Amino acid sequence: MQNTRISTLFDNIVDGLARFFLNPWRRFSILLISLLLGNFLGTAVSTISGQKADLDIVASALLVAATEVISRLAYSTPIATARSLPVQVLNAVKLGLIYSLFVEAFKLGS
């Protein structure tokens, strides 16, 4: 690929973000924010699909498929890939989503 100004700028931004998240506290904070985002998404998905009662089965099938794909990506790949920040962020969102759906089920009593 040819080195253009936009590709050089993009490479510099990606390298800067990678160096920024090498700090353990910043990495922990982004993972905590991802967990809370997953918790929010679980509440949002359950209320939206609860209002539109036609899509309950489709939404649950998509959520199960997405969580299985993320679990396979996070737990069946080599350690170096599983410890990368994007995979850990996806896994944290998945954990927050599942936790939130369990809490919503307990609130509804089902």
Image (cartoon, rainbow, N blue to C red):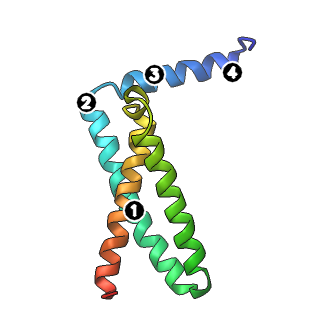
Q: Which residue is mark 1?
A: 97
Q: Secondary structure at mark 1?
A: helix
Residue furthest left in the image: 25
Q: Tell me where residue 65 appears, x and y as whole percent.
A: 54, 60
How many C-alpha atoms fall within 10 Å of the one at disc 1: few (<14), some, or many (≥20)? many
Q: Residue at x 41, y 31 (%)?
A: 84
- Disc 4 residue type (three-letter): Ile
SS at mark 3 in the image: helix
Q: Residue furthest right?
A: 2
Closer to viewer: mark 4 or mark 2: 2
Q: CA distance from mark 2 to mark 3?
A: 16 Å
Counting labels gives 4
Per the model, the C-alpha gap separating discs 4 and 3 is: 15 Å
| Three-letter amino acid code of the residue under disc 1 | Leu
Labelled pair 4, 1 in contact (Cβ < 8 Å) = no
Residue drawn at 44 percent across, 30 percent down: 81
Residue at 51 percent across and 50 percent down: it is 69
Circle 4 residue? 6
Residue corresponding to mark 2 = 24
Q: Residues within 10 Å of mark 4 (few under 14, many from 20)?
A: few
Determine whether label 4 and label 3 are within 8 Å by CB: no
> Which residue is at 34% across, 77% downward?
104
In x, y percent, where is residue 64?
50, 63
Q: Residue furthest top?
A: 3
- Image position of 83 with respect to 63: above or below: above
Report the amino acid beneath label 3: Gly
The answer to which of marks 4 and 3 sits earlier in the sequence is 4
Instruction: Kindly report the distance in space between the C-alpha atoms of the residues bearing marks 4 and 2.
Output: 30 Å
Relative to residue 30, is residue 96 depicted above or below? below
Q: Which badge, 3 or 1, is on the more N-terminal residue?
A: 3
Which residue is the site of mark 3? 16
